[in-house]
Image (cartoon, grey):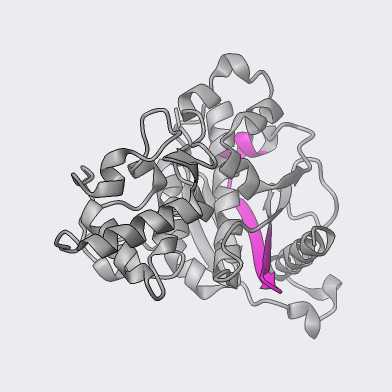
């Protein structure tokens, strides 16, 4: 059984508070505590920050390798607590948004008689990432059949940011048809993130992660534990291609400091749990600027369509 990570909130990662001005002090506390996720420092019910994380009375137990950080001074801990209160808390140690219910409960087969019910039972951040999903008239059965029988699948996504608002769109295609199909799901969503630091890389990552989440949902609902299928994801951002195809090296500390590392890490976790093979491939963007839509290759055509879809979503949700 493949479970969703119900404790990672991509738009609310601790890593996001690590940069800029006085936040350097707060980041020193984060490194000392050895934490990346909010889930690393919450109480078991997911509703409050654990007291030890506010004071630094102990460190998080983790298999991840962190750079050495001696215990920061008092002013640094004041900055750390200030950042946590400003970003995550409503009063005391209580989280403004409690972490979601355990994935095992969310995916309980007795609660999900249909695939749409399963999608609605997923953690909030997973639903937000996949967005408004269309073309599910067969409940994803065609995609599940491809996965079971080892047939290849292709997927496309695109993302962009304009005026500090990001959006992304995605699709998984069972066929090469260029028109509406009830068996080829599509989705679009607003990209979560801090408007002050949001860039297109996060939107591009979000489209890829939405595809991975959807495949994970299919495998969960249809109980697919092994598959010879290769899913090709066509991407117009070289950085996301490299990150999708490259495994994070735990001993390479410089990777932890890269932009939108949380999205990269989450994608790698989901890819590792999927029974199929995921590969990322490059497609040149905006080819419709100089080629008629009907004359585009299939790879370029769906890239253009996802670009237009995410633009429409952003304009409609301003």
Q: Quadrant of residue 281?
A: bottom right
Picture quadrant of residue 261: bottom left
Above or below for 48 versus 269 = above
Residue 161 lies in the magenta-colored region: yes
Q: Is residue 298 left or right of residue 251?
A: right
Residue 296 lies, in percent from the top left, at: 77, 73
Task: Specify whether residue 28 is in view.
Answer: yes
Vertical order, 132 against 164 (above or below): above
Residue at the spot x=21%, y=59% of the render? 66
Nearest to the observer: residue 212 or residue 153: 212
Asked whether 146 falls inside the magenta stretch, the response is: yes
Of residues 245 and 31, the one drawn nearer to the viewer in this rendering: 31
Q: Is residue 23 above or below residue 57?
A: below
What is the number of callouts on the image? 0
In the displayed orientation, state which residue is furthest to the top: 110
State left or right for residue 194 relative to residue 7. right
Q: Which residues are magenta?
A: 143-168
Instruction: Estimate the x, y position of residue 213 in percent, counting from the top left.
Output: 56, 44
From the image, which quarter does the N terminus lie in? top left
User: Is residue 185 in sight in this rendering?
Assistant: no
Of all residues, the one furthest to the bottom in this rendering is 290
Name the image quarter holding the C terminus.
bottom right
Q: Quadrant of residue 112?
A: top right
Q: Residue at x 54, y 71 (%)?
A: 197
Image side of residue 76 versus residue 200, left or right? left
Where does residue 270 sit, x and y in percent of width and height? 45, 46
* Nearer to the camera, 4 or 214: 4
Residue at 85% x, 54% y is 179
Q: Is residue 2 above or below residue 199?
A: above
What percent of the width, then of the height, locates residue 185? 72, 45
Compared across the picture, whether 128 is left or right of 38 comes to: right
């Amino acid at each position: 059984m493949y479970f969703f990570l119900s404790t990672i909130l991509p738009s609310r990662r601790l890593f996001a508070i690590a940069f800029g001005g006085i936040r350097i002090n707060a980041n020193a506390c984060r490194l000392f505590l050895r934490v990346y996720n909010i889930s690393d420092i919450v109480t078991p019910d997911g509703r409050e920050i654990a007291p030890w994380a506010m004071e630094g009375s102990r460190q998080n137990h983790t298999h991840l390798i962190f750079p050495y950080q001696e215990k920061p001074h008092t002013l640094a801990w004041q900055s750390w607590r200030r950042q946590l209160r400003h970003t995550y808390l409503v009063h005391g140690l209580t989280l403004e948004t409690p972490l979601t219910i355990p994935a095992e409960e969310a995916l309980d087969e007795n609660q999900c008689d249909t695939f749409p019910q399963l999608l609605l039972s997923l953690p909030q951040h997973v639903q937000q990432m996949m967005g408004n999903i269309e073309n599910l008239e067969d409940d994803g059965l065609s995609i599940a059949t491809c996965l079971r029988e080892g047939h290849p699948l292709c997927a496309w996504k695109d993302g962009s940011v304009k005026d500090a608002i990001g959006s992304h769109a995605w699709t998984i295609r069972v066929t090469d048809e260029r028109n509406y199909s009830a068996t080829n799901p599509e989705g679009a969503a607003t990209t979560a993130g801090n408007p002050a630091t949001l860039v297109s890389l996060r939107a591009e990552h979000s489209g890829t992660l939405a595809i991975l989440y959807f495949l994970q949902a299919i495998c969960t609902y249809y109980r697919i534990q092994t598959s010879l299928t290769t899913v090709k994801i066509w991407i117009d951002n070289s950085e996301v291609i490299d990150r999708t195809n490259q495994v994070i090296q735990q001993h390479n500390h410089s990777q932890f400091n890269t932009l939108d590392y949380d999205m990269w890490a989450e994608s790698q976790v989901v890819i590792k749990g999927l029974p199929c093979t995921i590969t990322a491939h490059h497609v040149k963007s905006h080819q419709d600027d100089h080629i008629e839509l009907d004359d585009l290759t299939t790879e370029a055509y769906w890239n253009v369509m996802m670009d237009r879809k995410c633009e429409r979503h952003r304009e409609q949700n301003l």
